[in-house]
Image: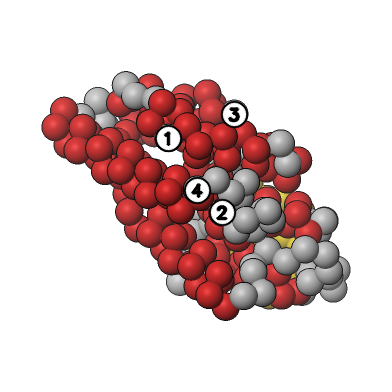
Amino acid sequence: MDEDEVVLLGFWTSPYVMRVKIALAEKGVHYYYMEEGDLFKNKSTLLLKMNPVFKKVPVIIHNDKSICESLIILQYIDDVWNDGAPILSEDPYQRAKARFWIDFFDKKVTDCGRRMWASKGADQEAAKKEFIESLKLLEGELGEKPYFGGDRFGLLDIALVPFSCRFYTYETLCNFSVEKECPKLIEWVKRCSLRESVSKSLPDQYKVYDFVLEFKKMLGIN
């Protein structure tokens, strides 16, 4: 591996991998992408070597050293490639607030999303209700700003927008409309999607839906 070569180990439907793709694109960093072909049954030797603790993507390899976990990777990218606009705010309070909302999203919203496709009946309805309530809280935090950090596309935007490629799946399986429930949040998604870093990093929403259906079959979930 060249001294300054960057390799990203990922899986195409992972929003956490998408976070890293967006950040690298925003910084203009050239990298090699290596897709995990069978992440669920046969993880690659390289992944197991570079992330022996969690054995998960994303992982970036830079200067032959691995960095794991998406938010840690985003911080690393911002520290190492510090030319141009930063990903993290220079203001400590704004950085802390962004991390709070990412923690809320990763713990609360992603769990609701999983329950929405993996359950049915009353459990699914309860998950949908929590999901919508959580998105409304995020919409309130966004307010009238173009991006969560104000006029600048930053950490919280990068962390959250990848999950928008799953909205169609949730809407189809649970019979609701994110745009109807949270119109300003969808305006923000559309605004972010105008950025090449986002549009080229997020997969087609219909392909994500098809993948979820196949994954449900694999798990024996009807």
Is residue 201 in view from this perspective?
no
Which structural element holds mark 1?
loop
Q: Earlier in the sequence, mark 3 or mark 2?
A: 2
Q: Which residue is mark 2?
A: 148
Q: Specify few, some or many for label 4: CA neighbours under 10 Å numbering under 14, 14-19, or 20 or more.
A: some
The three-letter amino acid code for the residue at tag 1 is Cys
The three-letter amino acid code for the residue at tag 4 is Gly
The three-letter amino acid code for the residue at tag 2 is Phe
Q: Which residue is mark 3?
A: 204
Of labels 4 and 3, the one closer to you: 4
Task: Please tell me which residue is depicted at 45% across the width and 45% down the height of the picture.
Answer: 139
Question: How far apart are labels 4 and 3 at the CA level?
Answer: 28 Å
Task: Please tell me which residue is depicted at 38% across the width and 59% down the height of the picture.
Answer: 104
Question: How far apart are labels 2 and 4 at the CA level?
Answer: 8 Å
Q: Earlier in the sequence, mark 2 or mark 1?
A: 2
Res 182 label: 1
Q: Earlier in the sequence, mark 4 or mark 3?
A: 4
Which structural element holds mark 3?
loop
Q: Which residue is mark 4?
A: 143
Image side of residue 51 versus residue 29, left or right: left
Asked if labels 4 and 1 touch by Cβ distance under 8 angstroms, the answer is: no
Question: How far apart are labels 1 and 4 at the CA level?
Answer: 11 Å
Residue situated in front as seen by the camera: 5 or 133: 133
Residue 118 position by quadrant: top left
